[in-house]
Amino acid sequence: MENYLNENFGGVKAKHSSDEALQKWRDMCGLVKNPKRRFRFTANIPKRNEAAAMRRTNQKLRVAVLVSKAAFHLLNGAEATSETVPEEFKAAGFGISADDAGSIVESHNHEKLKNHGGVDCLANKLKTCTTNGLAVDDKELSSRQQLFGTNEFTEREQRSFWVFVFEALQDMTLMVLAVCAFVSLIVGIATEGWPMGAHDGLGIVASILLVVFVTATSDYRQSLQFRDLDKEKKKISIQVTRNGYRQKLSIYELLPGDIVHLAIGDQVPADGLFLSGFAVSIDESSLTGESEPVKVNSENPYLLSGTKVQDGSCKMLVVTVGMRTQWGKLMETLTEGGNDETPLQVKLNGVATIIGKIGLIFAVVTFAVLVQKLFASKIVAGSQWSWSGDDALMLLEYFAIAVTIVVVAVPEGLPLAVTLSLAFAMKKMMNDKALVRNLAACETMGSATTICSDKTGTLTTNHMTVVKSCICMNVSNQENEEIPDSAKKILIQSIFTNTGGEVVVDKEGKRVILGSPTDTAILEFGLSLGGDFQTERGSTKVIRVEPFNSTKKQMGVVLELPEGGVRAHCKGASEIVLAACDKVINENGEVVALDEESLNRLKSTIDSFAGEALRTLCLAYIDLESGFSAETPIPSSGYTCIGIVGIKDPVRPGVKESVALCRSAGITVRMVTGDNITTAKAIARECGILTDDGIAIEGPDFREKSLKELLEIIPKIQVMARSSPLDKHTLVKHLRTTFGEVVAVTGDGTNDAPALHEADIGLAMGIAGTEVAKESADVIILDDNFSTIVTVAKWGRSVYVNIQKFVQFQLTVNIVALIVNFTSACLTGSAPLTAVQLLWVNMIMDTLGALALATEPPNDELMKRAPVGRKGNFISNVMWRNIFGQSVYQFAVIWLLQSKGKSFFGLDGDDSDLILNTLIFNSFVFCQLFNEVNSREMEKEDVLDGIWKNKVFVSVIAATVIFQVIIVEYLGTFANTSPLTATQWLFSVFTGFLSMPIAVLLKRITV
């Protein structure tokens, strides 16, 4: 079976599956009872193709619009046309309508922007200030929302409960049974009258309705869970200036006129226009499919919603929001495309297809045998030419039994059990600070064999402070800082101008530092030296900015000084910036040549700081000639070293224990960081990642290794320092393809996107992570904590094992129900389990079984076993052992009851057959209930451990027992049952209970 599944249903990957692979398994599903339900949580391929076509059209449309506009202005002598502002906009004080403003950005209409007086005049027409942003109260907000719309996208309406009821009714076999029930009602009433003749038909109708409503309730609850998770995924905040101060707002609160601050990795939240900024490069591939980045500046000021900031930073004026943007229209189509189905879903669809085909053959043969027996008895009695209503009802009952065998045999619930388990796990993981974006990541994480983790913010707290510094060649611990005035002036200028952070005042009047943890630490250091951020920024003019990125490991700024002259400041990785210096400021504040002695002293200081697990940065400057062009790159050498700072970022509590837990679970943890190798090794040892036989390597050395050398060292690499995004990507690719590892990778920056994309599971940081990183990730770690990653791994294993438990349980029921009805029909000419009873059994093993077993919470035992890895068999030998062992026992019990039951219980009256069949049905159900308890553990003998903690499981078992008592004792007319004696009840429960010691014996058989 495993080979068949891998060949026909194994093409779907955890992510990035081709449309051909997705379509192939759909075509292989020959027997599907309810396509609407079976394929509910799968990708809508036609809608995806529609979205891709829309992207292609966006680019062509923009070109066409630009060409037509140019032609129009050429023909009309480029006359300025003034569009009339609608009365409602005029009355509210706006000088431009929503449609008019939207067309400027969407069609890149330079002429129209010029006619409106440029960006500043457009801001006035939108009643906003480019410095202080919107000045609005609640009334003004409401008016603006009414006229310009909100920054929200049209979503599919939440489907009501009755839609799920209707979809559950689409089950082909249930529809056939409904027809049988209708015919049974007509024939029964015609022959036996009302109400006696209606009992069989009404019994089937009641069973169908019960199955439909229980199924619909389960599906509806799942849909609500996914809806809640979708809302969490869409929570994106952005820095905005409104009412004169900087604040964080949800992108859904943005309005035309808002001033938005964008940085590397941000997603552009609405259509807008560039106000000010440096080196802005935009990736428009999500909207147009074009991979070439677009430069945005005052000449090309158009920023489109949904695109990503690849480089630089800027201020943007919001012009158009929500469904008026091209992104809004594309999102509407994209949401209808759905999520990719997971490999486990597809595999279980394969299992359902195989068993369904077997079940169909059994059903046809069973029906044929039953009909043949009826004909044979008629021929023996010589009444083959005279048929009564009872004979017609008998044929109908046989047909209903055959159809119900198909109902039981086709495990429609298998693929849906995956979604049920994933929905449950995702909801619980959300409480544990992990937001799952890609459904398949949940199950894939359970197979992970390697975690490549960042250091900063993941293994450490990301709360940074400068605790040591070496300024003017003097090492200080911040308590007795004495810096010459001339050097202090340059240092403060370097700190406050060469930064991605800001010091602002909030609405309460408090000073707030914005920016990355590193920028925040250095700005705090600058403030402690007595510097003033606003004064320093106001006294110089910025000519050029080169933002920090993971490749260069440094950032730079070129300033025009107030006293004249031009100066460039540089800040970054200590050894890289120090290598660019040829001068240094000495103890007296004088600039002197950087001789070998001074250089060695600085290098030893860096090593000393790094050995204390401090993150080191070097600050340097260079005076340039006047007339420096903004287009000229910042020099790469000739700098004067101002000093080195050591930043403390403590290891998170619990990380060491989590790393040890990973090791016991067979998961290798590797640290991949951009930091100095000495710092990285110190932190790695503190976390328990770097062991005596492990290798710590720097990115540049890793890059120079030959393929043969890489294959030797990669399995031993535990720390990679000074790594570039390409190094991270290369390491992940080799681990996955060459060594067959299942790799989870953490990332927070824009440049981490390729590695997150390449990994089996991409884990983005929720606090420090950029929107680009989150977009590429499968799971977002909301608290940036490594311990949460281990929790995700535990939940992933739990999902995988829970589905295995459910499959083991369901296949046992399938096999026994099929063989019992088939052999009984062949040997006795009747089926012991009626259509109504089989429908009840189907509900126990399908919806209720999935609820009980697929929602089992994880336990610590899960992290003491080796990971499944890439090549593990889903239906393992252990499962087959348990399935066949329990099937043989259950079949033996039922067959003994059929052959010896009457004599054993002394049944000899007219209703002896009915009582015996009820006893068989009751014993069969209790065997399933106790086997459900057995299925909680596939190898562990103590299956009752922690059972009372799982309220869902206990509730399902209790509800099933109560319903079983009601069916047997009170619904005999409809369910073809007869009340049982206390002895018979005790026997039924005891036969079920016996499956538990049998399970213990089975688990002692090694496979």
Image (tube, rainbow, N blue to C red):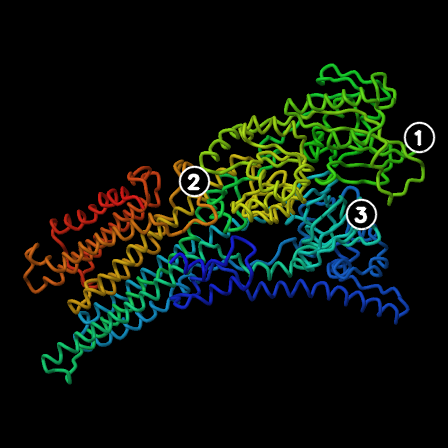
Q: Position of residue 298 (x, y in %)?
A: 83, 50
Q: Residue at x 29, y 41 (%)?
A: 943
Nearer to me, 692 or 647: 692
> Badge 2: few (under 14), some or many (20 or more) residues near its Cα, within 10 Å?
some
Q: Nearer the viewer, mark 2 or mark 3?
A: 2
> Badge 1: few (under 14), some or many (20 or more) residues near its Cα, within 10 Å?
few
Q: Report the residue marked by disc 1.
A: 563
**Which amino acid lies under the numbered mark 1 shown in the image of this protein?**
Glu
Q: Residue furthest front?
A: 708
Q: Which of the two labelled residues, at mark 2 and mark 3, occupies the earlier sequence position?
A: 3
Separation (CA) of disc 2 from disc 3:
55 Å
Separation (CA) of disc 3 from disc 1:
28 Å
Q: Position of residue 345 (x, y in %)?
A: 44, 56
**Residue 328 in the image: above or below residue 236:** below
Where disc 3 sits, the SS reads strand
Q: Which of the two labelled residues, at mark 1 and mark 2, occupies the earlier sequence position?
A: 1
Q: Nearer the viewer, mark 1 or mark 2?
A: 2
Q: Report the residue marked by disc 3.
A: 275
Please state if 410 lies on the left or on the right of 561 as rendered.
left
Disc 3 + disc 1, Cβ < 8 Å: no
**Which amino acid lies under the numbered mark 2 shown in the image of this protein?**
Ala
Q: Position of residue 511 (x, y in %)?
A: 72, 29
Residue 866 circle label: 2
Nearer to me, 188 or 127: 188
Q: Residue at x 54, y 44 (%)?
A: 743
**Which amino acid lies under the numbered mark 3 shown in the image of this protein?**
Leu
Residue 475 appears in which quarter of the rendering?
Answer: top right
